[in-house]
Image: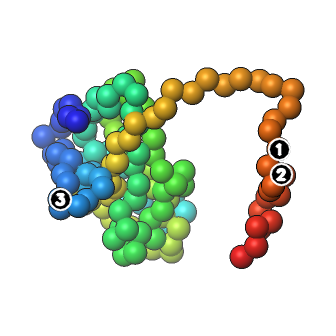
Amino acid sequence: MQIRYKKTTAEAVEPKVATAGSAGADISASEDITIKPGETRLIPTGLVMEIPAGHVGLMFPRSGLSLKTSLRQPNSVGVIDSDYRGEVRGMFTNTGTCDVVIRRGDRIAQMIVLPIPGVEWVEVAELGKTERGEGGFGSTGR
């Protein structure tokens, strides 16, 4: 599969798969940005891309970024729809007590592109029964 992309700025870094076994491509910041404690910011990548129809781009935070800084993605994963043509940006919140500085070229996320099934939502009067039923949070044990 090919993902077509365009750099919107000379500072943009092309998506790069680090190793043959990597699940996703590293996505990098296209400019320096400081995120203050408690602040949520969008980190620009300088990239626009065409996710193929029937697929979705999922942006996950890089484990190294999460380990070495207090940055967290408030929405857990970024969703890039196939019909979106704006700049891909990463949303991060600084959960720490000190500023976090991201430099141009820093790898901030990894993108995995997956197929999505066509889904038809159907309203019904009753749903099928299961052994679990309505058991929720913690109902299946530890």
Gap in Å between the C-alphas at discs 1 and 3?
44 Å
Q: Position of residue 3 (x, y in %)?
A: 23, 35
Residue 39 visible in this rendered orientation of the protein: yes
Q: Disc 2 residue type?
A: Gly
Question: Which residue is label 2 attached to?
Answer: 133
Q: Position of residue 74 (x, y in %)?
A: 54, 55
Residue for point 27% across, 32% down: 49
Gap in Å between the C-alphas at discs 2 and 1?
7 Å
Query: What is the quadrant of residue 125 in the picture?
Result: top right
Name the quarter where the N terminus is drawn: top left
**Front of the two marks 1 and 3:** 1
Question: Which of 55/65 is in front?
Answer: 55
Density class for disc 1 (Cα within 10 Å; few <14, some 14-19, many ≥20) is: few
Gap in Å between the C-alphas at discs 2 and 3?
42 Å
Q: Is residue 125 left or right of residue 66?
A: right
Q: How is the image coloured?
A: rainbow
Q: Position of residue 95 (x, y in %)?
A: 53, 67
Residue for point 61% across, 23% down: 120
Res. 129 mark: 1
Question: Which residue is label 3 attached to?
Answer: 20
